[in-house]
C-alpha cells in the first residue's frame, strides 16, 4: 500500500533545499575567487556551469515553494 501524500512540510523542505543550494553556490564562487590562478580553464568553466544550474534550481525551488503557499 502506498503512503499517503503528506505535503504539509513541503515548504520547509523546499526552503532547506534553497538554503543548501545557495550555500553551495557561494562556496563555489569563493573557491573560484581564491584559486582562479591555480585551476585549469576547463575546471573554471565546469564550476561556472554548475553554478548556473544551481541558480536555475534556486529559482525553481522558490517557484515551487510559492505554489505550496
Image (cartoon, rainbow, N blue to C red):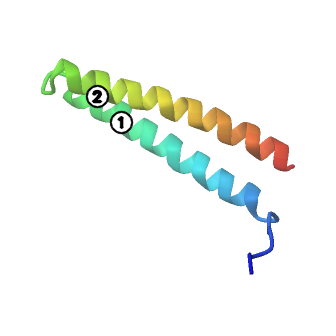
Residue 51 disc label: none
SS state under label 2? helix
Q: Position of residue 10 (x, y in %)?
A: 74, 59
Identify which residue, 29 or 10, lies in the foreground.
Answer: 10
Residue that mark 2 sits on: 32
Against 51, residue 6 (above or below) is below
Q: Quadrant of the N terminus?
A: bottom right
Q: Residue at x 59, y 51 (%)?
A: 17
**Identity of the residue furthest to the top in this view:** 41
Q: Residue at x 61, y 55 (%)?
A: 16
- Please indicate whether residue 10 sits to the left or right of residue 16 in the image: right
**Identity of the residue furthest to the left in this view:** 38
Q: Position of residue 57 (x, y in %)?
A: 58, 37
**Identity of the residue furthest to the front in this view:** 1
Residue that mark 1 sits on: 28
- Please indicate whether residue 69 sits to the left or right of residue 64 in the image: right
Q: Position of residue 23 (x, y in %)?
A: 47, 44
Mark 1, Cα crowd under 10 Å, few <14 / some 14-19 / many 20+, is some
Amino acid at each position: 500500500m502506498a503512503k499517503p501524500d503528506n505535503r504539509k512540510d513541503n515548504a520547509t523542505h523546499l526552503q532547506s533545499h534553497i538554503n543548501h543550494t545557495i550555500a553551495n553556490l557561494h562556496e563555489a564562487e569563493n573557491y573560484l575567487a581564491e584559486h582562479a590562478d591555480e585551476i585549469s580553464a576547463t575546471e573554471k568553466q565546469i564550476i561556472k556551469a554548475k553554478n548556473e544550474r544551481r541558480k536555475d534550481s534556486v529559482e525553481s525551488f522558490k517557484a515551487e515553494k510559492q505554489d505550496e503557499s
